[in-house]
Amino acid sequence: MNDSIVWVIIVAFYAPLHYLLPALFLFITGNESEELRKNLIKRALIDSTLSMLLAFVIAIFLVKSGYMIWAMVALFCSMPVPFLRVFTHRSEMSQ
């Protein structure tokens, strides 16, 4: 199978989890006002974008170097990064 097709499949399954889990978490939990919750969700989506781009840069570099397993580990380990930022932003904005 072509490498570009494989990466498209990986992104198609990885991106929804990476974006939707932090946004859904913020939507369901917390007792912030509607405006504050919207700001938190916007920040979570921005953080998800940045962490996903960084994770894919690292993963592509590792795959090109012949470390496919470590590339998948890097993608897996980047999944909780937006949650760390969610908790940081939530504590900053609630003060």
Image (tube, helix red, strand yellow):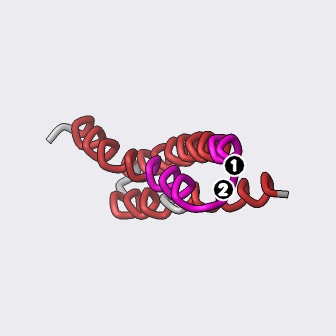
Q: Main secondary structure of the magenta part?
A: helix
The residue nearer to you, when weighing 37 against 92, is 37
Left or right of residue 83: residue 92? right
Quarter occupied by residue 11: top left
The residue positioned farthest toward the left in the image shown: 1
Secondary structure state at the residue bearing disc 2: helix
Secondary structure state at the residue bearing disc 1: loop
Q: Amino acid at mark 1?
A: Ser
The residue positioned farthest toward the right in the image shown: 95
Q: Residue at position x 38%, y 46% from top?
A: 16
Quarter occupied by residue 46: top right
Residue 9 position within the rendered picture, expressed as x and y whole percent measured from the top left: 25, 43
Task: Residue 71: say if magenta.
Answer: no
- Badge 1 crowding class, 10 Å Cα cut-off, few under 14, some 14 to 19, many 20 or more, is few
Q: Amino acid at mark 2?
A: Arg
- Dots 1 and 2: beta carbons under 8 Å? no
Residue 60 position within the rendered picture, expressed as x and y whole percent measured from the top left: 41, 45
Tell me the distance, in whole angstroms, between the alpha carbons under discs 1 and 2: 19 Å
Q: Residue at position x 85%, y 57% from top?
A: 95
Q: Residue at position x 68%, y 40% from top?
A: 35
Magenta extent:
18-38
Left or right of residue 16: residue 88? right
Left or right of residue 79: residue 12? left
**Which label number is shown at residue 33?**
1
Q: Nearer the viewer, mark 1 or mark 2?
A: 1
Vertical side of 3 occupied by 87: above or below: below
The residue nearer to you, when weighing 79 against 70, is 79
**Which label number is shown at residue 85?**
2
